[in-house]
Amino acid sequence: TIRIFCMGASSTFGYKIPLKELYNQKLEKMLTCRFPLKKFEVINAGISGYTILQGLRFLQGEIINYDPDVITIYFGWNEHSLSLVSDKEQAILSKEIFILQEFLERSELYKFFRNCIFYFRVGINKILKGQGRRELRVSLSDFKDNLREIVKLTRGHNIKLYLLTAPINKH
């Protein structure tokens, strides 16, 4: 069995996309048709809202333990979002809190109140300190560093890595 993990944010996870339209589903179907004598296990490891920093941590702490043969990486959409706190300044959640948060993230009401509380708490502290400006969640320099770490980690474990990006319509 060839184990493939598809990592990324909502574009990989499939936010508001039918299951059969997800690229990991299409990849598994394509590989199975093209190589009928081989068995493929394609796992959707996309998490809505994640950036490459969170993806690196997820790879280091979880995915690497499942001995993947191939990993696809599709990050880049959330990194340039503005926030009062960069991703590297945010706390790392425990596995239990992370699972609960993933469940709650399905609720628009939860996301609304979470954002209100977060921006109030963080925003007030930064405003009081005179630091009320918003910044990128992940700087370009941090993006490059995180990508290098992912490449280094996958090479060190003999995992094939494919970097994906969104297609561009030139018309």
Image (cartoon, rainbow, N blue to C red):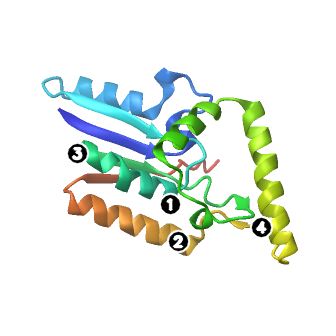
Is residue 17 shown left or right of residue 147? Answer: right
Q: Secondary structure at mark 1?
A: helix
Residue 74, given in percent of the width and then of the height, sits at 47, 49
The mark nearer the N terminus, 4 or 1, is 1
Name the N-terminal-most of marks 2 and 1: 1
Q: Are marks 3 and 4 in contact (CB under 8 Å)?
A: no
> Which residue type does callout 1 highlight?
Leu
Say which amino acid is labelled 4. Answer: Arg
Sequence-first disc among 1 and 3: 1
Mark toward the start of the polypeptide (3 vs 4):
3
Please state which amino acid type lies under the numbered disc 2.
Asp
What residue is rendered at 79% in x and 49% in y? Answer: 117
Please give the label number shown on residue 134: 4
Q: How far across and down, in percent of the image, does residue 138 sit?
A: 60, 65
The residue that disc 1 covers is: 53
**Type of amino acid at the residue the image marks with label 3:** Asp
Q: Is disc 2 surrounded by few (<14), some (14 to 19) or many (20+) residues within 10 Å? A: some
CA gap between label 4 and label 1 equals 18 Å
Of the numbered discs 4 and 2, the one sitting upstream in the chain is 4
- Look at the numbered disc 3 and give the secondary structure of its residue: loop
